[in-house]
Amino acid sequence: MSRINTNVSSMIGQVNLARSQGDLQVHLQRLSTGLRINRGADDPAGLIVSERLRSELSGIGQGVKNSERASNVISTTEGALSEVSEMLNGLKALVVEAANTGAFSKEEIAANQLQIDSAIESITRIANTTTFAGLKLLNGSLGYKLSGVNGAHIVKSQVFGAQFGDRPNVKMDVEVIGSAQTANLYFNTNFTGVGQTAGVLPSSVTLQIAGPKGVIELTFTTGTTINQIRDAINARSSVTGIAAARQNAGNPSSGLVFSSQEYGSEAFVSVRRISGGSTFTFARIQNNAPGPINWGNPAQWTAADRDEGQDVRVLLNGAVATGRGLNVTFRNPELDISLQLAAGFADRISSGPSTFYITGGGSKFQLGPQVNASQQVDIGIDSIAATQLGGTQVPDGSGNLILQFLSSLKSGGANALDKGNLQNASAILETAIDEISQLRGRLGAFEKNVLQTNVRSLQAGLENITAAESVIRDADFARETSSLTRSQILVSAGTSALAAANSSAQSVLQLLG
């Protein structure tokens, strides 16, 4: 039938031509942008997934940048610590040299003191001036803040890492469950033979006394009192690390106790009879129980010529911490801490915990793409100023131990060269050297085992996720070019077909002719 009011063929041609032109525009857009998905209608599900992947890529990329910046911070810190380490080694040489008084004059020792003063001032200056983009690194700004530390229980505390999460502070409960002990050997001075006097040697004896620092040999003749034996041993404590004392000052038959000056399993005391004294009894208490010894109870003690100390055992927030002498270390993913306990607290089982709080501070490094505790690492870097470095308990001259620092080696300080306390000065320097070395080691391990591995793992993830996002979102140019050619042909054919459909209605004019 021939109708002119409605040209169905033209309508069909227009619809298909519009489709072809739409496809042509889509392929042109993809080729011009390089993207397969330019708007949600192109692939709704693909758009959602690709946006999530893009978000992950952004976080991972920033995580890599954070790790690289953290590595720069650590490198800057380690460089300054290296200089401090060199100066401390130089100070140790100066102190050892000053001890050689038989070959060095007072003027030379005074010159050494000037060098010590200058080096200590330089260490404090480095602590105050080492910065990274305005961030102070070694003045204590990156150290943790503690509150409520009982100095009678905890002499020294160092927090190397603590995660707070959503807590305002971290509560620390320190409870002694195994006492720290010195090594102790007991000498029975209750001589009961005919004509013998308690506390006075009935025969000569030669003893070899050994301790952590060294060994000596002493000979005591008949009639030597236990007070004289005690004084002779104590006069050489700096050589052996062993001190002697009477169990009961008012009872000469109570015996002598030979004790190591240090606590822990590395401390020991050994007393061997070289000659004489075959009837003398040396003993240790069974099961490392604390003294005094009861000579009338043979079940309490056993004859021995050597005894070792015992390390402290501590519960730290309910977990058993490693003890070494009076020192306690504890490390897990949430806490890294070192404590030096007071002898009066560590040498007995606690009736209750000693509590303090970590209230803030530290340096937080965001290493992962998500902001949560599992992708963050916290590190504490305490001040290395001379007033904070090298804290060591040393004798104060009256038999007591006092905590002293590197600053005490300066002129006028308790351990300056002219004061003659060179053993104390050497001990403080050794502690300071250990502290700097351990800090450098911790930072080096953090950079190598955390930062560098984190960068490598994030870069691998960045590559794989980028490839996945590309598969979803990027255009395949070979495919799009082929589809573009097809769309161009269809548009041309559709245009020609529409023109033919529009002209077909003119055939009705022949009916009017």
Image (cartoon, rainbow, N blue to C red):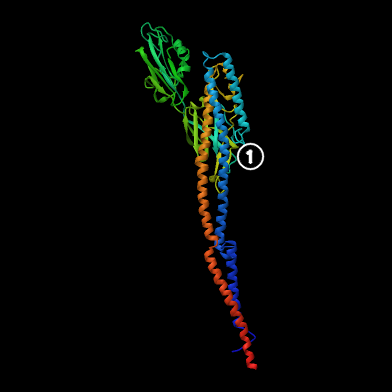
Q: Quadrant of the N terminus?
A: bottom right
Residue 296 seen in this snapshot: no
Q: Using the image as rendered, state which of residue 237 and residue 112 is in the foreground.
A: 112
Quarter location, residue 170 = top right
What residue do we see at 55% from left, 16% from top? Answer: 420
For the image shown, how many numbered marks are present on the structure? 1
Residue 445 position within the rendered picture, expressed as x and y whole percent measured from the top left: 50, 38
Q: Above or below — where is 194 with respect to 165?
A: above
Q: Using the image as rendered, state which of residue 73 and residue 389 is in the foreground.
A: 73
Residue 141 position within the rendered picture, expressed as x and y whole percent measured from the top left: 61, 35
Residue 137 seen in this snapshot: yes
Residue type at the position of mark 1? Ala
Q: Which residue is mark 1?
A: 133
Quarter location, residue 186 = top left
Q: Is residue 300 left or right of residue 361?
A: left
What residue do we see at 63% from left, 92% from top? Answer: 510
Q: Secondary structure at mark 1?
A: loop
